Amino acid sequence: MAFLDDKYLLGSESALGIFSKIQNLPIIDPHNHADVAEIARNTKYSDPWQVFAATDHYVWEVMRKREVPEKLITGSATPKEKWMALAKVMPEIAGNPVFEWIHLDLRRRFGIETILTSETAEDMWEEVKAALAVPSKYPQALLKEMNVEVMCSTDDPIDTLENHGIVNDSVKRTLIRPTWRPDKSKRIQKKDWKEYIQKLSDRFQIKIDSVGKLVEAMKLSHKYFEEHGCRASDHDTPFVCPCTATEADADAIFQKAMAGNEISNAEFAVYADYLTARYAEMDAEAGWVYQMHIGVRRDVRDIITNTLGPDAGGDVSDHWVDIVMPLCSFLNHTDEKLKVVLYTLEPSHTSSLATVARAFGSKVRLGSAWWLNDTPIGMKRQLEYIGSVDVWYDFAGMVSDSRKICSYASRFEMFRRVLADVLGDAVEMGKLPYIYAENLAVKMAYEEPKKFFNL
């Protein structure tokens, strides 16, 4: 088998046949971190570094792992110098999915089958840069080329969402929908929390002097997002909230924080729990999907966080998260009323989440193996386990979770190949008829996510 050939990730004739049925299906992407303003401007990308690595934490971290100086990753070096540094270490990261994603992007978007190395980097830089100058490689054209039917960005409740309208008017259809992400309202221990509450107050012209007023403002935001095509919320979940806190307890903590006093971890948990319950109720009433991303510990490397700020790489999975009983309490709070998708970064959580999803019926679904787990190994193990414990048909589908649009197709291609391989293995072992596997693949790759997320 040659590198990234037609049999890439496909281990059987059944897998090859199944993949042929899903490889060209439109992309439904319910969760990403697209720069919607960039897509609205729809101007040319400046260079290969911007397209392949400037916003990609995966790339940054493997470069750091191979001892590339930070100047050549996020620092003051020119984009071309950073590109050359990436090319130099590219052979050393072979086996990591970053190696595959970048070369898939080069092949699928630019027709370049050469391996990126120090020797090929200069010519590749010029070839890609020339291609980027053509309007067919501008953001909106790339999304059309990749057959993206709908994509859901990640947006703060104070966002006004004008750029979504600009893009959708430009392409004459609903291509981008917003997703409501209220994490900042819950992060009461952060130094900028009070500043954020003031921004929220200004945005909706409400004096937020209690947790009740905060909820009132968030309801206005929720309604605004609903009117602008939102179909889901998204929640960073370092710990799972059981939805048992009272308004009185949450308000006491709110008042303490507004007075400038330090909030303990226990108080944060109570405050976040109260808001979580209210946000879940809002989603249930609107018919949205509540997306829960479980088990990440962010910004663990001080030297990166202190010099570059948050979300610059250095996030890890945490197996030591109390999931089952708090999650069951949360799900019971809105049982049969709320659609929920459970994403896990930590592979060891898969068994617990699969059994919980099974217990709570078709409104609670497992999302794709998330973040550092969305590799061929991580996705295959998760899909195999889902098939043995939960129901493949109710899988919530793939998400790109990407900050760079050029990689949407490569991420979905990798997932669809893994999906075809898992279902193909089941056919080869006599576990189900081929036609059932083929139908399941279409459902899991396209039809069910589109239906479940109301897209």
Image (cartoon, grey):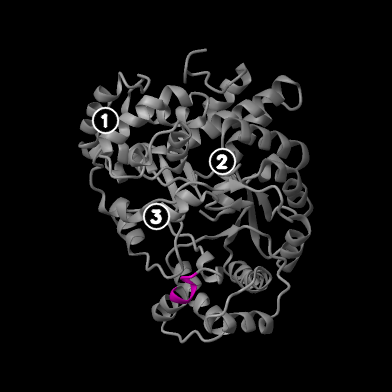
Label 3: few (<14), some (14–19) or many (≥20) C-alpha neighbours in 10 Å = some
Residue that label 2 marks: 372
Magenta region, mostly helix, strand or loop? helix
At mark 2, the secondary structure is: helix
Query: Would you say residue 109 is visible in this rendering?
Result: no
Q: Is residue 430 left or right of residue 202?
A: right
The location of residue 118, given as percent across then percent down, is: 32, 22
The location of residue 397, given as percent across then percent down, is: 58, 44
Residue that label 1 marks: 128
Label 2: few (<14), some (14–19) or many (≥20) C-alpha neighbours in 10 Å = some
Residue 312 tag number: none
At horizontal 55% and vertical 34% (from top left) the residue drawn is 415
At horizontal 76% and vertical 64% (from top left) the residue drawn is 329
Q: Earlier in the sequence, mark 2 or mark 3?
A: 3
At mark 1, the secondary structure is: helix
At mark 3, the secondary structure is: loop
Q: Earlier in the sequence, mark 1 or mark 2?
A: 1
Residues tagged 2 and 3 counted as in contact (Cβ below 8 A): no
The location of residue 310, given as percent across then percent down, is: 46, 55
Q: Amino acid at mark 1?
A: Val
Height in image: 358 above or below 230? above
Farthest residue in the front direction?
303
The Cα atoms of the two marked residues, 1 and 2, are separated by 27 Å
Q: Is residue 54 left or right of residue 444?
A: left
Magenta residues (range)? 191-195
Query: Would you say residue 233 is visible in this rendering?
Result: yes
Which is more foreground, mark 2 or mark 3?
A: 2
The location of residue 203, given as percent across then percent down, is: 40, 77
Residue that label 3 marks: 174
Q: Amino acid at mark 2?
A: Leu
Height in image: 158 above or below 362? below
Residues tagged 1 and 2 counted as in contact (Cβ below 8 A): no
